[in-house]
Image: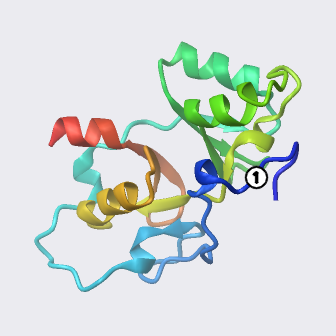
Amino acid sequence: DTTMGMSNDEDTASVGSHSLKSSTKSISRNSVSSKKSIQSKTQKPVSKLRPSKPILLKQSLSVVDVCKSLSKKRAAAALITDSRSNLVGIITDHDITRRVVARQLDPSDALVSSAMTRDPTVVSMDDPAMDALSTMVENHFRHLPVVDSNGAVVGVLDIAKCLNDA
């Protein structure tokens, strides 16, 4: 459920309904590792994909404030946190285009919490890199938050950067 009439169409397919727990660790987010198949110990971990430093913003900000932050940092996505710094969502340039601009909402009045994708799937630094990339491709995610073994956000994967570095 989101405010301002956001619907569950193709652009919201990244919203997961997973319990926020990993099968291998106590991570408090949707995690790729919860869907792991039997993996080879020789696979590269997500950390080898060199996740970017995340842009962390509060859910109480307006969309225009988020746009200013994204523009200043030349980024296409920000991770959204609540007042206790817990990850609650992700917003991308694509989300802003479809959920704010296309609906002719005023970005100064619209809160980021109404346009973001809630409870995003995350990947752990120790998860196999191929699992993370497969998750991104299969679910049409361009960005995937990365957490440490305690569930704290430590980075974000960008599919274009990952493929360019490959």
Q: Which residue is located at x 84 percent, y 21 percent?
A: 106
Q: Amino acid at mark 1?
A: Ser
Q: Position of residue 164 (x, y in %)?
A: 20, 35
Of residues 112 and 23, which is closer to you in this image? 112
Mark count: 1
Q: Quadrant of the C terminus?
A: top left
Image spot of residue 85 (x, y percent): 69, 49
Q: Quadrant of residue 119?
A: bottom right
Q: Is residue 96 above or below residue 20?
A: above
Apparent side of residue 92 relative to residue 42 in the rendered image (left or right): right
Residue at (61% x, 73% y) in the render:
20
Q: Along the horizontal axis of the image, is 151 left or right of 140?
A: right
> On the picture, is 67 further left or further right than 7?
left
Q: Is residue 3 above or below residue 122?
A: above
Residue 23 drawn above or below residue 46? below
Which quadrant of the structure image shows residue 86? bottom right
Q: Residues within 10 Å of mark 1 (few under 14, many from 20)?
A: few
Q: Residue furthest left?
A: 42
Colouring used for the render? rainbow
- Residue 92 appears in which quarter of the rendering? top right
* Image position, residue 162 (x, y; %): 26, 42
Q: Secondary structure at mark 1?
A: loop
Residue 123 position in % (x across, y down): 42, 61
Q: Residue at x 26, y 60 (%)?
A: 129
Question: Quarter holding the N terminus?
Answer: bottom right
Q: Which residue is mark 1?
A: 7
Q: Is residue 85 left or right of residue 130?
A: right
